[in-house]
Amino acid sequence: MFASSELIVNPDGSIYHLHLRPEDIASTIIVVGDPDRVPKVSRYFDCIDFQIHKREFVTYTGYLGDKPLTVISSGIGTDNVEILITELDALANIDLQTREVKPAHITLNIIRIGTSGAMQADIPTSSRLVSTAAVGLDNLMNFYNLPQSAEERAFCSALQQAANLPFTPYRVSADTDLVNLFAEGSEQGITLTAPGFYAPQGRQLRAAQTLTGFLDRCTSFRMGQERLTNFEMETAAYYAFARLLGHRAVSLNGILANRALQRFDENPEATMDNLIRFALEKIVASDL
């Protein structure tokens, strides 16, 4: 039984941060960073049965055809993802009244639709990229017992040495079936999840950096046939918590910047709208 200080339930029976109850979410959940992107996804739903806005967490649940879908915003960063996925899992797999784990596990399908910057010259702006795996540069998994394969650990050790990192990153793969669902016409690659937008992604404005040349080292890094393809700020945490909690996750990235060519998408709104419509079409046609 989880103590009230550990599993916090609001007076209306909703989970603490998200202000959601179990009946408020579908088993297929689209996650976005920007709260303003939630209505940009849900405008394609046939109906919306529920919506709530609490902090940066905006949630709409409805139907597209006969498929129940939830779209929810996380805000920016892996720390927000920890709260989001932990509480979504609690809604699915903990009885909030008895505070006990439910006897039958419910697997959530978590599909991130977000923006990203490519670090390789051959990945054009306005394209979409499916993250087959993600490498986390944040320290969140130092607080969790994340199982990793020998191959994942070797990749991270090699990257640590090549990029001159003062810490060891972590690597986690996406759900293979979800990758295959969205693979058609998409780039695929290994995403680097950064704990910031500027220095942790090799950008420098006025503040001095410690890891000079970081972007170039990440761009040139190779291990066998594998390379890093793009930067963003949440994917590794989604994949890690999916592994920890028994869910399925995939990250779909709209490529708005190409760092190697120093270009930015001329029409980022169209790029993201195309990605949203692509994702929804694939979801509707699937057995999710």
Image (tube, rainbow, N blue to C red):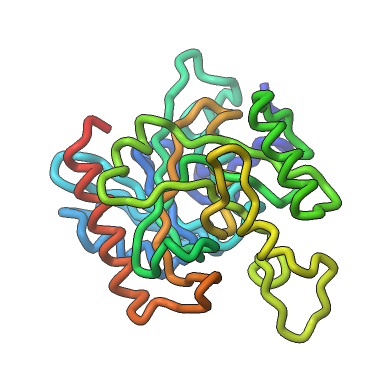
Residue 232 in which image quadrant: bottom right
157 or 201: nearer the viewer? 157
Residue 195 in which image quadrant: bottom right
Picture coordinates of residue 187, whole percent (x, y): 37, 51
Picture coordinates of residue 253, whole percent (x, y): 42, 57
Where, quadrant-wise, is the C terminus in this rendering?
top left
Instruction: Report the residue at 49% width, 70% height from top.
Output: 258
Instruction: Report the residue at 46% width, 40% height from top.
Output: 132
| Residue extending farthest bottom | 206
Reply above or below: 47 against 76: above
Picture coordinates of residue 79, whole percent (x, y): 66, 52
Using residue 141 as the reference point, say whether residue 75 is left or right of it: left
Using residue 254 as the reference point, say whether residue 93 is left or right of it: right
Instruction: Report the residue at 73% width, 28% height from top.
Output: 145
Picture coordinates of residue 2, whole percent (x, y): 68, 27
183 or 57: nearer the viewer? 183
Instruction: Report the residue at 54% width, 71% height from top.
Output: 259
81 or 46: nearer the viewer? 81
Whether residue 259 is visible: yes
Where, quadrant-wise, is the N terminus in this rendering?
top right
